Amino acid sequence: MLELERPIVQAPMAGGPSTPALAAAVSEAGGLGSLAAGYRTPDAVREDVRATRTLTGRRFGVNVFVPGPPGDPEAVHRYAEGLRADADRAGVGLGEPAHDDDAWEAKVAVLVEERVPVVSFTFGLPRPDVVSALHDAGATVLVTVTTPEEAVQARATGADGLVVQGVEAGGHRGGPSDEDGVGEYGLLTLLRLVRDAACLPMVAAGGLVDGASVAAALVAGAEAAQLGTAFLLCPEAGTGAAHRRALEQGRDTPTALTRAFSGRRARGLVNRFLVEHSAAAPAAYPEVHHLTTPLRAASRQAGDPEGINLWAGQGHALCQALPAGELVRRIGDEAASLLGR
Amino acid sequence: MLELERPIVQAPMAGGPSTPALAAAVSEAGGLGSLAAGYRTPDAVREDVRATRTLTGRRFGVNVFVPGPPGDPEAVHRYAEGLRADADRAGVGLGEPAHDDDAWEAKVAVLVEERVPVVSFTFGLPRPDVVSALHDAGATVLVTVTTPEEAVQARATGADGLVVQGVEAGGHRGGPSDEDGVGEYGLLTLLRLVRDAACLPMVAAGGLVDGASVAAALVAGAEAAQLGTAFLLCPEAGTGAAHRRALEQGRDTPTALTRAFSGRRARGLVNRFLVEHSAAAPAAYPEVHHLTTPLRAASRQAGDPEGINLWAGQGHALCQALPAGELVRRIGDEAASLLGR
C-alpha cells in the first residue's frame, strides 16, 4: 500500500514535535514522514504541506483528528475546580473549556486541494464521502484503530489501510472509542486479531523503537511500522526543551495513560500533574485540552517538566538522539538484516 | 538455553488446565510442556512429575509460586463484606482468608529430589540458594518478570533465563510486584527493554496464539514463546467445562485485569463477578483466593460462567480446539516457515 523503501512511518505528533523538516528527513531516507494537522489552523496546515514539498519530492502524510461528541459539562466543571489551586500557584487563569471540531471540514478541504499523498485519521472514523474525496485527489487513506471491532468499522469507511495502535504507544490513544479499558491491547496480539477481523494492510504502532521491534511487527503481518517516540530526540523534531530533557534524563521513568492533560487517554512519562489529576480527569476532549492550555504553557515557560504533558511510549528508554534520516536508515537496515531481506 | 525442537513452551496454568497429559503431549511434539505446582500439595506435585515421566522421556518444566507478604487484613475484611450477598445467593459461606506460602519449601524440595529438568518461578524472586540447589540437581531455572527492573533483580538470583510476560497474558501477572500499573508493558516493547537491561535468554509470554506471533517474538529476541490460552481448548487440558464453553462462545468478549478472584492481578474474560468486584478487590494474595474459593466452586458446579475466573489472554479469540501435539507442530512449523528456518 505505502510501498516504502524502508518500512518506517514517522508518527504524526501534534502539538509541536512534527515539523516539515522532520517529515522531509524521514521521507528522504526512504520512510514516510508525517505532519500533524491537530491544533493547527487550516492555513498553517497548508503552509506545512507546502514547506514539506520544498524540502522533499517524496511522498509524506498528514494526520487529522476526527471530531467527537462533547463531554459532560458538569464533569468538566468539577475537574476545573480541582485545577484551581494549580492555576493560582502558576498565576494564570484556566482556559475556556469549549468543545470544537478543530476546523475539521476546512482541514479536509486543504488536504484534498493540496493533493496530500497519504492522509491518516485518528480519534474517529471519517465519513465515506471524505474518504472518496481524498481518493479522488490521489491520496492513500489510513484510519487508526485500537481494537478488532474498530478495524471492522474502519474498513467500512473505504480506507486503504489501518494504523494498528497498541497500548504501548505514546501520546493519544487514536481509536474512535475513549472508554476505559477499550483498546488496551498489546501491539503484537492486536496485529493478529485485526488481521483476522478485517484483512486490510496494516501499519503497526506502539512502543516500536529499534530494528528488532520493527522487524517483529513486520513478521506479525504489518506492512510498515509507525514510530513516534523514537523521533522525539531528533534535531529536526520540534520537541519542547523540557520534554526533550525529561526523555533524556528519565530513562527509568515509567509511563502511564491519563486524561489529565487533554480529556482523552494518552500515554506520557509519569510526573506530578499526571499523578495528581489522572483520577479526576473526565473523558471530555478537547474541553480539557483547552482548560489546561494556560497551565501547560506556564510550566513550559518555567522549564518545569512536572506540569506538562510528556508524551512518551513504553519504549522511550531506547530512543536515540540522532538525525532523523540516520535513524530511519539505521532502524530500517537493522530490521532488513534481521529478516534476511 | 532450552534447546527446543519447536520453540514453544506450554505455560504452566495452575488451578486445573495444566495436566501431565498436556505437558507430555507438548514435549513429545518438540516443545516444552509444563506442570503447575500452585494450589497443589507437594505430594500431588510429585505424582504429577512422575505421571508426566511415564508419558514422555522428554524434558518438561514445573512452575512454582514464590510466597509474598500478607495483605492488609482490614482491606480483606472489607472486601469480604462486599462478597456477602454473593455468598448468600449461592447458599455458601466465604472461605477463610488465611495467608500461606503454598508449601513453598516442601515443593522446592520435591523439585530438587525429582530432578525436574526446567523449573520456573512466578510471583517473586527465588533465593539464590534455591536456584543453586536446583542447578545442582540439573535444572534450568527461569524467573518470570514483567518489567526491566524485575529482570535486573531476577538476574541477580542466578537464574538461567527469564519468562518475559507482557500485559496481554491471561491468568496472573507473574512478576514480583503487584502494584497497580507496574508491569503493564506490551510484550514486544518489553522484550526489547529487558534485553537491554538484563542480557539473559528470554522466553516471551503474553497473547501469543499463532505462528506469526511466535515468529515475531523470536525476531524480537526471545529464544522461545510461552503459550497458555492457546492450549486451553486442547482435549489434554484440564480446563473446566464452563471455562471451555466461555472461551468457545465468547470470541468477542473482552478481557480485563482484576484482583477480584484471587487478590492478585490476573487477566480473564469480563463477566459479572469481575465487573461487580474488581474495583473493591485489595492486593492480598492468597487471602482473597481462599475467600472466593467456595463462591467459585458453587458457580462451577452450577455451570455458571459469570461467577468464576475465566482466565484468558488478549488473543483468546484465535485459540483452536486441537490436540496439543498437533497445535505445537502447526504453530511451530508456521513460525519456522515465516522465519525461513
Image (cartoon, coloured by chain):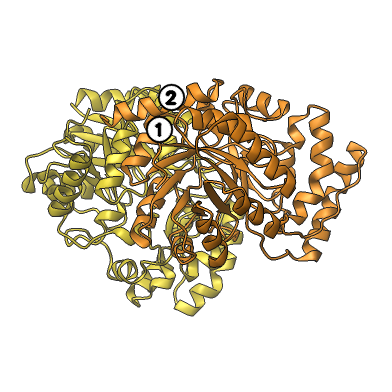
Chain colours: A orange, B yellow
Q: Is residue A293 left or right of residue B210?
A: right
Q: CA distance from mark 2 to mark 1?
A: 7 Å
- Residue A322 in the image, given as x and y percentages of width and height: 54, 20
Q: Is residue A268 visible?
A: yes
Under mark 2, the amino acid is: Arg
- Check if mark 2's residue and mark 1's residue have beta carbons within 8 Å: yes
> Of residues A241 and B45, which is closer to you in this image?
A241
Compared with residue A298, is residue A244 higher up or lower down, i.e. above or below?
A: above
Q: Which residue is mark 1?
A: A6
Residue located 67% across and 30% down the image: A239
| Secondary structure state at the residue bearing disc 1 | loop
For the C terminus of chain A, the quadrant is top left
- Residue B164 in the image, given as x and y percentages of width and height: 37, 37
- Residue B228 in the image, given as x and y percentages of width and height: 29, 51
Of label 2 and label 1, which has the lower sequence position? 1
| Secondary structure state at the residue bearing disc 2 | helix
> Of residues A66 and A93, which is closer to you in this image?
A66
Chain identifier of the residue bearing label 2 in the image:
A
Under mark 1, the amino acid is: Arg
